[in-house]
Image (cartoon, grey):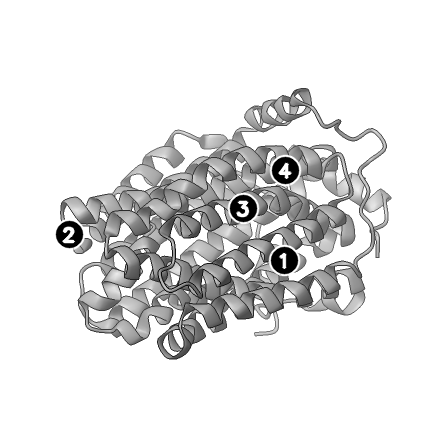
């Protein structure tokens, strides 16, 4: 069993990674509360599938704009400064949500503006954060470090939503927003302790030319393009999160709303806790494809039952499938992309795993409004299965990716072994 246990070695020997881990656990807990409170408040104000789904729609544009530009900034300025400043910016949007929730009649527009603001801040910070990790840890520790970064998010994402339902039911959304503000303050303190991560001397300039340089590099890598397409397809057609507040009502389990959000993360954390298998695994293309198909199967099955516990079980299995894909995608990216492009490619990676879910929320909401919640869930899962299979069949370079033989992976391994990390 020791071969499958998550590897804690990077945390033990790398203080910068420890600070990032602690900061993330605390910050993500508060974020998880807000991620439940925000759509819940929209649902309470409007009682509309489309309005809740529209939250994803308003987040897409700022995410695309700021993720692409955030990638350029990640390759041209200190990545640590970028991350902690964005954490401080997110705190301000949480404060706006708290102030709005204290009004006698909260404004719906403020909720959508805050959702767009969080999306913009996430777009700016995530490329820098993703690009930080390969600079801070040894090359051979990257798979384990990535699993630990996933674990820190998952732990808070289980605890946060599970408590969010109770907190919202007993104290209202204002308490959830207040806790989020406190967690952001603590997060900033820990982020300031991390070593500076300045750009490379010959790094990218802050220009449109640098942005297009990153896009050209990504387009030249068919294995990378495959990871983007597969995840976008799976998330767009089979992301049911916008339906959770209505789904809980439909099966008479409103009290369990937080469990709907946490179920997928429970599956994810099981995969992460047993991620030691990644040390000797190399066939990432097949793993990502199979995991995306598994996600679609589980989502479709969740839509076939009115049993709360079966729904949660299938959502947990879907989360486990998604985490296999996520770990393999992130490791593939970290082990094959040159640091010169890492920030810009991290921006594209953010779009690949964020735009799909956001657009998928709108698809799920509009389909449910036109047909029914069950039809929206089941049809999305089936479309995911079919279209992921077709996409993988059309992308042989991605499908057959092998870490041992991939030329980019071999090149990066040689480069990293020649240069020390920043700890």
Identify residue for label 4.
70
Along the line of sight, the residue nearer the viewer: 133 or 337: 133
Q: Earlier in the sequence, mark 2 or mark 1?
A: 1
Name the disc covering residue 329, or none: 3
Q: Earlier in the sequence, mark 4 or mark 3?
A: 4
Neighbourhood count class around disc 3 (C-alpha, 10 Å): few under 14, some 14–19, many 20 upward: many
Frontmost of labels 4 and 3 is 4
Along the line of sight, the residue nearer the viewer: 298 or 81: 81
Q: CA distance from mark 3 to mark 2?
A: 33 Å
Q: Residue furthest left?
A: 371
- Where does residue 177 sit, x and y in percent of width and height? 50, 65
Q: Is residue 150 above or below residue 70?
A: below
* Residue found at x 52% / y 65%: 154
Quadrant in which the C terminus is drawn? bottom right
Along the line of sight, the residue nearer the viewer: 332 or 177: 177
Q: Which structural element holds mark 3? A: helix
Answer yes or no: do the residues labelled 4 and 3 have beta carbons within 8 Å?
Answer: no
* Image-based side of 257 in relation to 373, left or right: right
Q: CA distance from mark 4 to mark 3?
A: 20 Å
């Amino acid at each position: 069993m020791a071969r499958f246990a998550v590897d804690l070695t990077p945390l033990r020997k790398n203080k910068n990674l420890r600070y990032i881990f602690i900061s993330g656990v605390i910050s993500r807990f508060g974020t998880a509360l807000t991620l439940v409170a925000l759509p819940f408040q929209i649902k309470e104000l409007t009682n509309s599938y489309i309005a809740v789904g529209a939250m994803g729609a308003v987040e897409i544009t700022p995410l695309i704009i700021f993720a692409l530009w955030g990638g350029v900034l990640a390759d041209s300025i200190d990545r640590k400064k970028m991350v902690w400043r964005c954490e401080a910016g997110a705190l301000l949007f949480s404060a706006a949500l708290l102030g709005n929730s204290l009004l006698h009649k909260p404004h719906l527009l403020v909720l959508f503006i805050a959702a767009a603001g969080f999306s913009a801040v996430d777009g700016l910070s995530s490329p820098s954060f993703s690009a930080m990790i390969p600079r801070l840890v040894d090359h051979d520790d990257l798979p384990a470090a990535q699993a630990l970064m996933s674990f820190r998010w998952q732990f808070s994402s289980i605890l946060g939503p599970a408590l969010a339902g109770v907190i919202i039911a007993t104290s209202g959304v204002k308490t959830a927003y207040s806790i989020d503000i406190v967690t952001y303050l603590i997060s900033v303190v820990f982020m300031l302790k991390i070593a500076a991560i300045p750009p490379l001397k010959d790094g990218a300039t802050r220009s449109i030319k640098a942005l297009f340089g990153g896009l050209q590099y990504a387009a030249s890598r068919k294995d990378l393009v495959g990871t983007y397409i597969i995840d976008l397809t799976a998330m767009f057609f089979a992301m049911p999160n916008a339906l959770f507040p209505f789904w809980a009502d439909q099966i008479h389990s409103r009290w369990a709303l937080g469990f709907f959000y946490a179920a997928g993360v429970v599956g994810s954390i099981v995969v992460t806790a047993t991620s030691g298998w990644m040390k000797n695994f190399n066939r990432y293309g097949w793993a990502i494809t199979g995991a995306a198909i598994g996600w679609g199967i589980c989502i479709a099955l969740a839509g076939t039952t009115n049993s709360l516990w079966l729904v949660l079980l299938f959502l947990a299995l879907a989360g486990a499938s998604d985490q296999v894909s996520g770990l393999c995608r992130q490791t593939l990216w970290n082990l094959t992309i040159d640091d010169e492009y890492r920030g810009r490619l991290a921006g594209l990676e953010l779009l690949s795993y964020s735009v799909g879910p956001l657009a998928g929320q709108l698809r799920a909401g509009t389909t449910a409004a036109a047909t029914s919640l069950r039809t929206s869930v089941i049809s999305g899962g089936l479309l995911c299965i079919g279209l992921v299979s077709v996409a993988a069949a059309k992308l042989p370079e991605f499908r057959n990716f092998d870490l041992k033989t991939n030329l980019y992976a071999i090149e990066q391994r040689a480069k990293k072994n020649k240069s020390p990390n920043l700890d």
